[in-house]
């Protein structure tokens, strides 16, 4: 029986993971489940899977969680310290699906226990890729990608020599605004940006998809995880979201990974790795689909991509600055303080401000310095947003 922990259990990735585990409950022992603020969902899942501990991020919700779990045998806890304690509990396989930079520290703690870390938290690699992978190596642990694009690249590389890779192409749906005229984007609303044409995801990641900031993070993630240069990584807009990535080799061949837009494939691959098990996902009917479209991304529509290449070129702690500024800009858009196109403007101005600081960007890669870079990126973006006239 494998011991499983899921960080971010109440989100879409966490729920898809629990769906797979629930199909063979006799094979798993659930150690820890964590969530942000959805007490009802967290308590229901903790009771269903007899989790050892359930942790809610918002400490004010601890009494409600305790009441919901009363008599279940599951321990209730809350806050960052409780989250780290849960990550330190022995587990064989840990899903890291917490949204944002908050997922880094519990992921590191899980790796220190020697667990396999299934990584859906892309920010961990963006902000501290070298630290994360070094920790895995130090403790004999393994990091497996769960983002659909990176799982696809990982699968295409099975049995291949990374030295033979010429290029890596990750695909993007183009988000909610891929067919909008440019002149409309400045007036795009939060509601409009929160509707994805292909994937069922949370609000923040759906808006990031519309702005392509999500893909920008994935470019950096590809660079950090696979060790390929920024010049080797490309993005193609692929409206059908069926080809998740392609790997090109020095002999001119391309290896593509196709699958339905269902995160249970990437999750299941990481869950069962290195074997493949039957999964409850749609089987593609290529004759019915008929054609697959690929379009070069418009740099003017998606300025976030160029910012990602800048971060990859700069290296060091620039990813932590970028991610923090992006999150602050996203908050500003959701709260109505800035417009849709102004998110990229804010991030670019933060990079202009902080990347020349060699003492910040090239500081040693450790948790304290990642936190410092994150704080500076966030605070700088928030100051800029306060000075922006949305009109």
Image (spheres, rainbow, N blue to C red):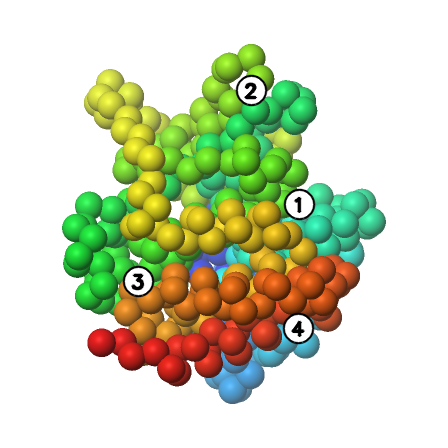
**Chain-order first, disc 3 or disc 2:** 2
From the image, state whether disc 1 or disc 3 is nearer to you.
3
- In the picture of the structure, the residue carrying the numbered disc 1 is 143
Residue shown at 53% from the left, 28% from the top: 167
**Chain-order first, disc 3 or disc 4:** 3
Local secondary structure at mark 4: helix
In the rendered view, does 39 fall on the left or right side of 87?
left
**Chain-order first, disc 1 or disc 2:** 1
Residue density around tag 1, few if under 14, some if 14–19, many if 20 or more, within 10 Å: many
From the image, state whether disc 3 or disc 4 is nearer to you.
3
Residue density around tag 3, few if under 14, some if 14–19, many if 20 or more, within 10 Å: some
Label 1–label 2 contact, CB within 8 A: no
Residue extending farthest top: 251
Residue density around tag 4, few if under 14, some if 14–19, many if 20 or more, within 10 Å: some
From the image, state whether disc 3 or disc 2 is nearer to you.
3
Q: Rounded to the nearest whole Å, what is the CA distance between mark 1 and mark 3?
A: 34 Å
Q: Quarter of the image for the N terminus: give it.
A: top right
Q: Front-most of 149 and 364?
A: 364
**Chain-order first, disc 4 or disc 2:** 2
- In the picture of the structure, the residue carrying the numbered disc 4 is 372
Mark identifier at residue 249: 2
- In the picture of the structure, the residue carrying the numbered disc 3 is 341
Local secondary structure at mark 2: strand
Q: Rounded to the nearest whole Å, what is the CA distance between mark 4 and mark 1?
A: 25 Å
**Chain-order first, disc 1 or disc 3:** 1
């Amino acid at each position: 029986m494998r011991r499983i922990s899921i960080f971010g259990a109440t989100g879409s990735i966490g729920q898809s993971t629990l769906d797979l585990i629930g199909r063979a409950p006799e094979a798993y022992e659930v150690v820890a489940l964590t969530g942000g603020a959805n007490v009802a969902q967290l308590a229901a899942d903790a009771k269903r899977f007899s989790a050892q501990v359930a942790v809610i991020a918002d400490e004010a919700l601890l009494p409600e969680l305790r009441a919901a779990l009363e008599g279940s045998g599951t321990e209730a806890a809350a806050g960052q310290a409780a989250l780290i304690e849960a990550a330190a509990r022995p587990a064989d396989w840990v899903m890291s699906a917490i949204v944002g930079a908050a997922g880094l520290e519990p992921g590191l703690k899980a790796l220190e226990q020697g667990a396999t870390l299934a990584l859906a938290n892309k920010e961990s690699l963006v902000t501290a890729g070298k630290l994360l992978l070094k920790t895995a190596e130090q403790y004999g642990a393994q990091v497996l990608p769960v983002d659909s694009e990176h799982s696809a690249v990982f699968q295409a590389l099975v049995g291949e020599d990374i030295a033979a890779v010429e290029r890596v192409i990750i695909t993007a749906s183009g988000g909610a605004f891929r067919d909008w005229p440019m002149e409309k984007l400045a007036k795009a609303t939060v509601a409009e940006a929160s509707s994805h044409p292909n994937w069922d995801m949370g609000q923040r990641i759906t808006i990031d998809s519309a702005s392509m900031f999500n893909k920008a993070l994935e470019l950096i993630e590809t660079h950090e995880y696979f060790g390929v240069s920024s010049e080797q990584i490309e993005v193609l807009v692929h409206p059908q979201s069926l080809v998740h990535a392609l790997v090109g080799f020095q002999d001119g061949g391309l290896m593509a990974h196709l699958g339905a837009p269902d995160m249970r494939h990437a999750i299941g691959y990481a869950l069962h790795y290195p074997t493949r098990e039957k999964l409850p996902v749609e089987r593609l009917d290529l004759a019915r689909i008929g054609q697959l479209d690929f379009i070069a991304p418009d740099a003017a529509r998606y300025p976030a991509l160029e910012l990602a290449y800048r971060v990859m070129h700069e290296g060091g702690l620039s990813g932590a600055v970028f991610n923090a500024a992006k999150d602050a800009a996203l908050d500003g858009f959701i709260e109505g303080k800035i417009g849709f196109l102004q998110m990229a403007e804010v991030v670019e101005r933060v990079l202009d401000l902080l990347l020349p600081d060699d003492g910040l960007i090239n500081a040693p890669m450790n948790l304290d310095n990642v936190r410092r870079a994150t704080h500076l990126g966030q605070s700088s973006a928030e100051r800029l947003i306060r000075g922006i006239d949305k009109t």
